[in-house]
Image (cartoon, coloured by chain):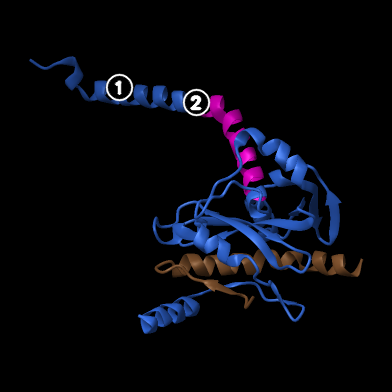
Chain colours: A blue, B brown
Amino acid sequence: MSKKTDSNSYTIIFSVGMVLIVGSLLAFLASYFKPTIDENKRIEKQQNILYAMGVNENEEGSVTFISKDVVGENFSKYITKQLVIQGGAISENDQAYLIDIKKQQTLAKEGEDRLFPLFIGEKDGKTFYVAPIRGKGLWDAIWAYVAMDENMVIQGAYFDHKGETAGLGANIKLRFFMDDFTGEHLLSDGQFKGIDVSKSIMIQRTKIKWIIK
Amino acid sequence: MDNQVDAIAGATITGDGVSAMIKSELRNYVSYFKNLKTN
């Protein structure tokens, strides 16, 4: 004797019902939590910017942002100006830190003038210029907040990624990599040169370690 | 100091991505900094 649940129509109706119920539930949860997610992203951006200019709670070897509870007041305290550069024009915008760099890069690809945010901070009598940047790693997006002085010498940086390999590329967000950028000059004889992540240095240092041993 | 930092072993492409990201993005801020000096 065949059961009602054995029929093809039952399976199809059940599948459609499950898709509708689960889909609706996920859509509801996504819209319900959207304000919380957006708020967390906003806080994270503030923490990243402050981290790059040295406002953090790092202990030896750790990467520790300042607490969510105090990030807002510290952001207002340390970030004195938020600028937006667009096609040579510079304007102030106190929401510049919310500018989506990914969207701006897409606009640039479409031939439009994109926005370049720059955050100016003051700490211990020193002025920091923090720029948010975004690029491509091995698997997915990588991004950073780079704090510079007026000579484009790097004063601190925070790197992050979406899906780099754990233990390898994902290590760009560890202190030993990020701290290495501090003191590096982006300009050479007045011309922009950038920074090379160089294997040759690593190989030379490994050889020296072997020779010392 | 020498425009170079240590690569991460086993992460050549990610490291190249970091170099490319710095070069392509931070280049756009050079004119701002040059103006900062002249003003």
Q: Residue at x 76, y 53 (%)?
A: A124
Magenta extent: A27-49
Helix, strand or loop at mark 1: helix
Give the side of residue A63 with respect to residue B11, left or right.
Answer: right
Q: Position of residue A48 (x, y in %)?
A: 62, 48
List x then y, in percent, for residue A30: 52, 29
Which quadrant, please, contains the N terminus of chain A?
A: top left
Chain letter for mark 2, please. A
The quadrant where residue A44 appears: top right
Q: Residues within 10 Å of mark 1 (few under 14, many from 20)?
A: few
Q: Is residue A113 left or right of residue A201?
A: right
Q: What residue is shown at x 39% (from left), y 82% (from top)?
A: A212
Q: Quadrant of the C terminus of chain A?
A: bottom left
- Amino acid type at circle 2 is Leu
In the image, A187 versus B2, the foreground residue is B2
Q: Is residue A82 above or below residue B16?
A: above
Q: Which residue is mark 2?
A: A29
> Looking at the magenta stretch, what is its main secondary structure?
helix
Q: Residue furthest bottom?
A: A211
Instruction: Please identify the quarter of the rendering in which residue A114 is found.
Output: bottom right
- Residue marked by disc 1: A14
Which numbered circle lies on residue A196? none
Task: Give the residue type at disc 1.
Answer: Phe
Q: Position of residue A73 (x, y in %)?
A: 72, 36
Whether tag 2 and tag 1 are in contact, CB under 8 A, the answer is no
Q: Is residue A22 visible?
A: yes
Q: Please say whether residue A36 is one of the residues in the magenta stretch.
A: yes
Examine the rendered structure and indicate whether residue A72 appears above or below residue A167: above
As drawn, which residue projects farthest toward the right? B39
Q: Nearer the viewer, residue A196 or A68?
A: A68
